[in-house]
Amino acid sequence: MPVNLEAPARGSLSPVAGVDVGTARAGIRKSGRRDVLLLRLAGGSAAAGVFTTNRFCAAPVQVCREHLAASGGAIRALVVNTGCANAGTGARGLADARRSCEEAARLLGCAPEQVLPFSTGVILEPLPMERLLAGIGAATADAGRSDWLDAAESIMTTDTVPKAVSRAIDVGGRRVTITGIAKGAGMIRPNMATMLGVVATDAALPRELLGGWVREIADSSFNRATVDGDTSTNDSFVLVATGASGVAIDGDGAPGAAPLKAAILAIAQQLAQALVRDGEGATKLITIEVERAASQAEAAAVAYAIAHSPLVKTAFFASDPNLGRILAAIGYAGIADLDVDRVELYLDDVHVATRGGRHPDYREEDGQRVMKQAEIRVRVDLGRGASSTTVWTCDLSHDYVSINADYRS
Amino acid sequence: MPVNLEAPARGSLSPVAGVDVGTARAGIRKSGRRDVLLLRLAGGSAAAGVFTTNRFCAAPVQVCREHLAASGGAIRALVVNTGCANAGTGARGLADARRSCEEAARLLGCAPEQVLPFSTGVILEPLPMERLLAGIGAATADAGRSDWLDAAESIMTTDTVPKAVSRAIDVGGRRVTITGIAKGAGMIRPNMATMLGVVATDAALPRELLGGWVREIADSSFNRATVDGDTSTNDSFVLVATGASGVAIDGDGAPGAAPLKAAILAIAQQLAQALVRDGEGATKLITIEVERAASQAEAAAVAYAIAHSPLVKTAFFASDPNLGRILAAIGYAGIADLDVDRVELYLDDVHVATRGGRHPDYREEDGQRVMKQAEIRVRVDLGRGASSTTVWTCDLSHDYVSINADYRS
């Protein structure tokens, strides 16, 4: 059961002018479900992306990087399949990813370099190309008939609900729409972005601006989410600007730039949190705030040490205020000169630890009260400097083990 | 169920001349079980230790360091309690650890600095001093009546079997005995040693030699074991040499030095593996060998990335050869210039991946056969240099979640 997260209602998502959504049921892994997505972009659209830092990055990620460079971001289509990640597939995997782009380009009448391919699912297995190519054909024929909720459904793997968000802003009396989708519930510790997030707007944005925004926004959204600390081979976050609204934004100082960027960030953060709320087996959303660290790297090291500790995560699952486990994680986070006598620990409003020991006013029942909540904030004050960070994670439950022990079956 | 690990048979462990074992049932956390251990050492004994690098190190760890320095290693007793870690307990915790040493010193007629204190159990809770001091009294009275199996039992927390090993070697016609005990099943990623390992011999060893050996041996044994990646606040590994056998070993070149060191290392490795075999919820022992890395640090980073991946660990639990998860872990281990086309992956004798993709001869049923075993070897050849390392870990099962969700109840 995802944590305070419901599927968007049908009709609640706004179409983005210049983007036609097509989906298909290609039977890539399971029959009868939507598993191929094609987003057809109007001429003049621009796209920018950030991708996994995993050295075993998937073939489609390599092809995305090539095609974004070769086309100068003048992308005309995104093609996504679920059920097979096309990672750890060597030369054959690269050829398969290129073949998918060629097929979409042939059908759409653009260059193969104007198509970005994405895959998600099992690693180390080849794509079933016959079924995928048929699916690309069907999704192309469907383009304009499916909606963004269908798109969000078509990219799910172990996700239990589709993830999609729309917003609209007004720029000089004209309406700009932004809609984003994402998927991912396990192998989630994005280290550029997560597989797969797409946010599209009908504003026009020059390529360099788009490239800067996508990195900044990923850093403050998807890159702050972790389910199990496993950085996927396929993480990709793509920002698309079609310009079809007639609103053009030339730079960070242009009218509308700030609210548009804020709206895109809000969508990205909401999607990133949605990944964690729907984390495999998650029963709780944990927000970890580390304050007064000496550097960003130090703040992140402490936040991730807490977020990845199986002992901390199982204590959250059990609603057990066994909070010494959080101190242990802070202690092994790698800060060699950490003065534990300056560390303060709070659970929501409850002051748990002060100066390296239990706070004199701390009562077990206060810790217990917070631990029972579905959403919990852990705040660590390191007392060392001025840097801070926030990381979202979930607990570790029996269902995480069940889901990942059975994933391929 | 621990993996191919049984409790030592009563009578199978050798007493070490110069060490008297005493235990008590002090009701620290649960009533009726042995939970206090006192090892009384003969005059002339020497001890050396290595301790956790966790910055939230427990009060007894701080006192151990102080006492080893103050006494020059001339230790006369080790006092251990289970049920409470005395970590995250601030100034009161330090006072409690010192008070325990004073009580043992008073009873034994030595200086408090000649007593080493150890605690294991829940973090962030104070020691029940009245019960502990009574337990120290009872264990002192018992000294010489309990045996090493009692000792191993008295330090268990979530361990399901006591862990103890004896060996004997012959040095110039004289018998030298070595017996070691250890505990630990969760919060196990020793980063100096594990809480708690003690190996005692009746050979005489000078302090510096002992200090060098304990670090070297910890590095090749306890520091290669990980259950959940959580480095404990209380890790301690202590080597004791009583000299009571009459065999003195002056330096690394002395007769008997090499076989004695090898015997101690073999015991330490056996105990370290025992921790993993009895890892919380473990159903499998996984040995991860990383070869041809550019450095030791790089080899360790890859080995631990695999060992700590919840996805890899759940796949082992399920006997599911979902081996792309291992490639993903190698890929995010932090080697920025890793050439995946040179990476080879083996599961026991099965060649799984070559040059960044599935090996052409790999068959699912071969992977399946190995995954079903209780002991599995993962071998990664990075093709980058001459460094290698070995790490032992276990799988992640439903029982790990159950044990750690219920630990304090």
Image: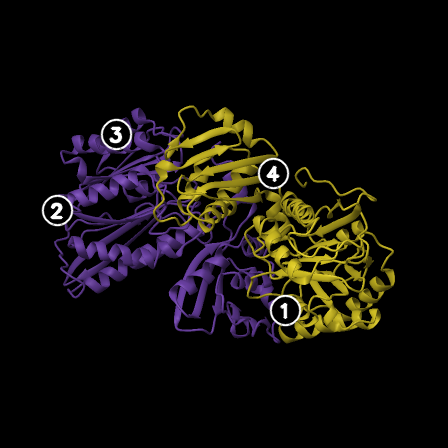
Chain colours: A purple, B yellow
Q: Are marks 4 and 3 in contact (CB under 8 Å)?
A: no
> Which residue is under mark 3?
A138
- Which three-letter amino acid code belongs to the residue tagged 1? Gln
Distance CA(mark 3)–CA(mark 2): 25 Å
Tell me the chain of label 3.
A
Q: Nearer the viewer, mark 2 or mark 1?
A: 1
Q: Position of residue B35 (x, y in %)?
A: 77, 58
Q: Quadrant of residue B330?
A: top left
Q: Nearer the viewer, mark 4 or mark 1?
A: 1
Does label 2 lie on the same chain as label 3? yes
* SS state under label 4: loop
| Element carrying mark 2 | loop
Amino acid of disc 4: Lys
Residue A260: x, y in percent?
Answer: 22, 60
Mark 4 / mark 1, whichever is N-terminal: 1
Say if mark 3 contacts mark 2, CB within 8 Å: no
B54 versus B298 height, above or below: below
Mark 2: which amino acid? Gly
Q: Which residue is mark 4?
A: B284
Instruction: Find disc 2 in the rendering and name its residue.
Output: A44
